[in-house]
Amino acid sequence: TLQFQEHAVDSTRLIQILAAMSHGAEPEGMLPDGHRIARAVDALVKDEAVPRREIAVLQFRYFSAFEMRKGALTLFSELAKDPVFFMELATLAFKPRDVDDDRPDVHPSVRNNAWQVMHEGRGVPGLSEDGTVDSVLFQAWVTDVRARAQNSHRQGAVDSTIGTWLSRCPADP
């Protein structure tokens, strides 16, 4: 059904199918192409009952399926809201500086996906739907991310990434 009619699949079942595929549940099974996967995730975005974090995680797992990275807006939005989530992906994407790599068991494709998200993503912490920025949320997010980056020995890479992500920020948040 997912192969041709993702809109006909219940959201809960669709999440289960996509999660199972991302974990290789049927290694011999036929996988839908990236376009179909992106359409399936887009169907979940339209369902307000689906938690945004679940959608964000699926958009991360299938990031390469989104030819237009704008299709991963839920992922970018969640990363701009949650410093812990942002740093989880930054930790996957960037090696620590001056210490041993703490990601030896992480598959290279996961590290690569995280690197792509960090480099291609954009977001403004504290940004409301009307385009204004809550300066308290903005400052708290930046402070929290930078502290976590320093603790994980990734401050240089994360500072650079923060700058890239904030490139669309209003001039006076």
Image (tube, rainbow, N blue to C red):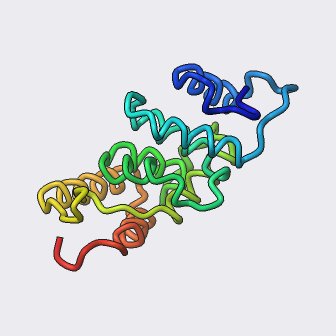
Q: Quadrant of residue 123?
A: bottom left
Between 122 and 156, the one lying in front of the other is: 122
* Quadrant location of the C terminus in the rendered image: bottom left
Q: Tell me: residue 165, above or below residue 115.
A: below
Q: Residue at x 44, y 44 (%)?
A: 88
Q: Tell me: residue 80, above or below residue 161.
A: above
Position of residue 14 measured from the top left corner of the image (x, y, whole percent): 59, 26
In the rendered view, does 127 fall on the left or right side of 52? Answer: left
Position of residue 106 measured from the top left corner of the image (x, y, whole percent): 63, 40
Between 173 and 33, the one lying in front of the other is: 33
In the rendered view, does 59 fall on the left or right side of 2? Answer: left
In the rendered view, does 68 fall on the left or right side of 4? Answer: left
Q: Residue at x 50, y 38 (%)?
A: 57
Q: Quadrant of residue 62?
A: top right
Between 161 and 96, the one lying in front of the other is: 161
Q: Quadrant of residue 163?
A: bottom left
Position of residue 70 measured from the top left corner of the image (x, y, whole percent): 51, 60
Q: Residue furthest right?
A: 28
* Quadrant location of the N terminus in the rendered image: top right
Q: Residue at x 42, y 71 (%)?
A: 164
Q: Residue at x 61, y 24 (%)?
A: 9
